[in-house]
Image (spheres, rainbow, N blue to C red):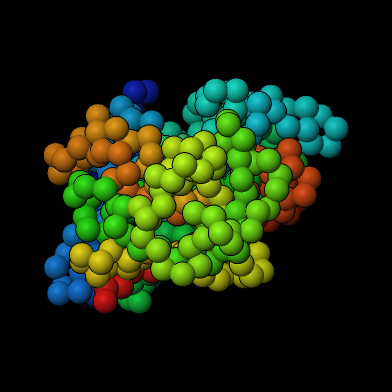
Amino acid sequence: MTKQPFGKTAAGETADLYTLANSSGMEVSITTYGGAVTSLKTPDRTGRIADVVLGFNAVEDYLKVSFYPGALVGRYANRIANGRFVLNGVEYKLARNNGANSLHGGIRGFDKAVWAAREPPGGDALELTYVSRDGEEGYPGELRVKVVYTLNHDSELRIDYSAETDNDTVLNLTNHSYFNLTGEGSGDILDHVAILNADRFTPVDAGLIPTGELRHVEGTPFDFRRPTAIGARIGQAEEQLERGCGYDHNFVVNGQMGTLRDAARVRDPKSGRVVEALTTEPGVQLYTGNFLDGTAVGKSGKPYGRRSGFCLETQRFPDSPNQPDFPSSVLRAGQKFTSTTVYRFSAS
Ligand code: GLA
């Protein structure tokens, strides 16, 4: 693992960049600023390497954008309706940074923190820790979070999350990498072919808050149970797609929450590159970069236009703190939270 300086935050905190490499030609760089994956290089079917995640060259560039590229997101990834929830009979009010709702942890979420870094023995992993103080962005309890990124020789980037709190709280951690398997900055991802291991998804209201329904995907543009191009149905006149301006929805991953199982597989027909996402979480948000507008210019000088990357944000369902029928996002004092997501790369 190598370490380099990566710039400074507005408050003058310095951030570093760590790079992990494996024997199959993969290389992953992660900055302590937001714990963000800034670059992920992987071969295509002929062995040609490309960087397949959107990102920037220095912290200063990350400070200018608000689309969470590559970042670790918390304390609560995705939306909480009206920026409020009740826990143990007490109402907690959060920062509202997305219309009436709270998105991705609030104004200064985990993506904007400088994480402490440590290299565990073995040389194939980076351990990041962050202490979120009691009351930060309105959330109760001092939360100690640990995230370990491991790059193994099977071309898997594994993300192990764990957390403990001194007071009951709610928690939803994810990684917000935008993938473009042709290479970052190479245009949109509409021809990428996706499979989602999900029979159901959580439809949303106009503010992208789940209605509480778990809707079967059969007969809808959300049916990715067989390989389908991301762009094949994205422009359909369908209420859910219109609300999300494309895909910006949480899918209910089939199988048992808590066990590592397939959530998604996306293949780029041009390069043959494939990413598979496996997770212990109950859900995965497919977000197709609908709000990217080309104003951000990426690390190699190319603009990031609409739908130039897709995210597979493994997670608890959005707004779980207000949805009694969703899997719980509550972490009790004294309990340990653990969660694992694997992004596996190949080419065919
Ligand atoms: C998430 C949300 C999107 C959008 C992006 C960031 O994926 O679901 O609606 O806010 O983050 O741009």
Toward the viewer: 32 or 205?
205
Q: Is residue 36 visible?
A: no
Q: Is residue 164 left or right of residue 64?
A: right
Q: Give the residue at x 32% y 44%.
A: 307
Q: Tell me if residue 7 comes above or below residue 82 in the rendering.
A: below
Q: Is residue 216 left or right of residue 46?
A: right
Quadrant showing the C terminus = bottom left
Q: Give the residue at x 73% y 32%.
A: 85
Q: Give the residue at x 47% y 51%.
A: 286
Spot the residue most to the right. Answer: 89
Q: Is residue 319 left or right of residue 244?
A: right
Toward the viewer: 146 or 178?
178
| Image x and y of residue 213, in percent | 70, 48
State which quadrant residue 88 falls in.
top right
| Image x and y of residue 219, in percent | 56, 59
Q: Is residue 265 left or right of residue 92?
A: left
Number of marks in the rendered image: 0
Quadrant showing the N terminus = bottom left
Q: Tell me if residue 341 comes above or below residue 240 in the rendering.
A: below
Q: Is residue 10 visible?
A: yes
State which quadrant residue 295 falls in.
top left
| Image x and y of residue 58, in percent | 24, 37
Q: Give the residue at x 18% y 60%.
A: 50
Toward the viewer: 100 or 61?
100
| Image x and y of residue 116, in percent | 43, 45
